[in-house]
Amino acid sequence: MLSQSRKCPRRRTLCQECFVAWWNARATASGRLDPPVSLSPASPMPGVYTTAVMLSEPSSGEASGPFSPRPSGRLLLGAPLSLTGRYALMGRLAAAGLWQVAGDIRGLGGVRVGADRLVPDLAVVDDESTREGVRRALDELTDADVLLGPYGSDLVQEAAGLAAERGRVLWNHGGSADQVQRLPGVVSVLSPASAYAGPMLEALADLVPGARLLIAAGSGRFARSVADGAHRAAERLGMNVVGAVPHAEVPNDLTRQVDVLLAAGTFADDLGLLRRLQGRPSALAAVGAGIGRFGAELGSRAEGVVGPSQWEEGVRFRADVGPRGADVIRSLRAAVMERLRAEGTGGHVDYPTAQAYATGLVAVRCVEEAGTTQDAAAERVAREFRCTTFFGRFGLGEDGRQQDHQMLAVQWQDGVKRVVAPPSLADAELRPG
């Protein structure tokens, strides 16, 4: 249950002002956010809607205040997200998307559910990038009408297991591992990880025909799914997979050994590998290259690197659910992304933010179509639902994975991330790496 945000004990539940103070203190300590987040009357990100951000931090011994049910007329969206820890970058980007979709729906007067018109509130609990944190966060979010997942396939797996035990549906924006998307009760908006490598290798196939491909993959479900998809794509495209090894086992000089290196690990692992390479092969691809901060971190070393992306600002779809892409981008930039500029996004909206926003749209629409907040009814709608949002197509396959959404391949060119595949959505031609 959620304690009253207006009491603001500065412990587990924070009002907007205290959330901003907390965020800035954490960011200042890590040197990640400058200028700091601030409140302004014109800003819809924190002012349009009043909700609590709950933080799973150690108790100071102070009383947390009485627990109370959520107000009537509200549709409570709840999410465990990594505001701290190893997934903090992606978690904060996702939180930005959830903040804004809740605010935008509120600005339109809410949503009709049965005979009631409900307006969304959002509760985010810091899971600290740990499985234990996810369990603790879900205990805090038992009152949520719509339960949105965390970021990271391992954390989504943990959340899905606990949600299933409680008969809850988990609306998934941050777990792309194929095994995770197949779990019962998980509704995924993003493409599965096995689809990541296809567009990248297709883009590189003409540039490096018959390439010798080395895959650097982590040990988690996500990395294994990316690697499995890479093997299948390579076979289809006539590439020769010469090995699949951990990042640490990739030689520093690859100029004579392979033609293409595909790195599929954590963001930090991909960065570390590319930093230490002394001899680059003909082409480099990395899962981390789909994030704007990749270029900020690597500088000139990012040039020519190809990456996967679930979505990019320049790609436009005719939406039949939710606002147009231009309107979503405008609202996110105005309300949130300027404050996250120091996260290395360059002020652009990255796909973790977009996919979280889209997941909120789809979840709320399914609740609306079901006419009830009951999870089973909303899930039945989702299994048959087909639509297009600003994020692209939504449609689940028989095995539960997202099947209709289309992945993109991007390449860093002159310090800018450009879409190079598929050809129908590309805004630039692939350059030699």
Image: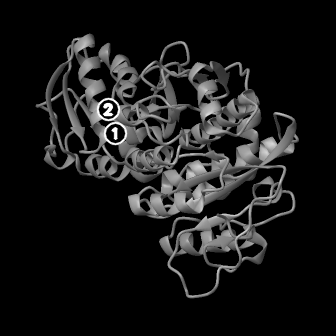
Residue 320 in the figure: left or right of residue 348: right
Viewer-side residue, 219 vs 246: 219
Query: Which amino acid type is marked by label 1?
Result: Phe
Residue 65 in the figure: left or right of residue 131: right
**The residue tagged with tag 2: helix, strand or loop?**
helix
Q: Residue at x 19, y 41 (%)?
A: 279
Query: Which amino acid type is marked by label 2?
Result: Val
Picture coordinates of residue 264, whole percent (x, y): 30, 39
Picture coordinates of residue 345, whole percent (x, y): 56, 48
Asked if one can make out residue 276 in the rendered structure from this viewpoint, the answer is yes
Instruction: Please report contact status of discs 1 and 2: CB closer than 8 Å, yes or no.
Output: yes
Q: Quadrant of residue 431?
A: top left
Q: Where 218 sits versus 19, above or below?
A: above
Viewer-side residue, 280 vs 57: 57
Viewer-side residue, 161 vs 229: 161
**The residue tagged with tag 1: helix, strand or loop?**
helix
Q: Residue at x 63, y 20 (%)?
A: 385
Mark 1 and mark 2: Cα distance apart in space: 6 Å
Q: Which residue is mark 1?
A: 222
Picture coordinates of residue 166, whole percent (x, y): 51, 48
Asked if one can make out residue 264 in the rendered structure from this viewpoint, the answer is no
Residue 370 in the figure: left or right of residue 274: right
Q: Which residue is mark 2?
A: 226
Q: Residue at x 70, y 36 (%)?
A: 364
Q: How are the residues colored?
A: one colour
Q: Where 30 sits versus 153, above or below?
A: below
Name the quadrant of the C terminus.
top left
Q: Residue at x 61, y 87 (%)?
A: 62
Q: Where 77 sits versus 26, above or below?
A: above
Q: Residues within 10 Å of mark 1 (few under 14, many from 20)?
A: many
Picture coordinates of residue 349, whole percent (x, y): 61, 42
Name the quadrant of the N terminus.
bottom right
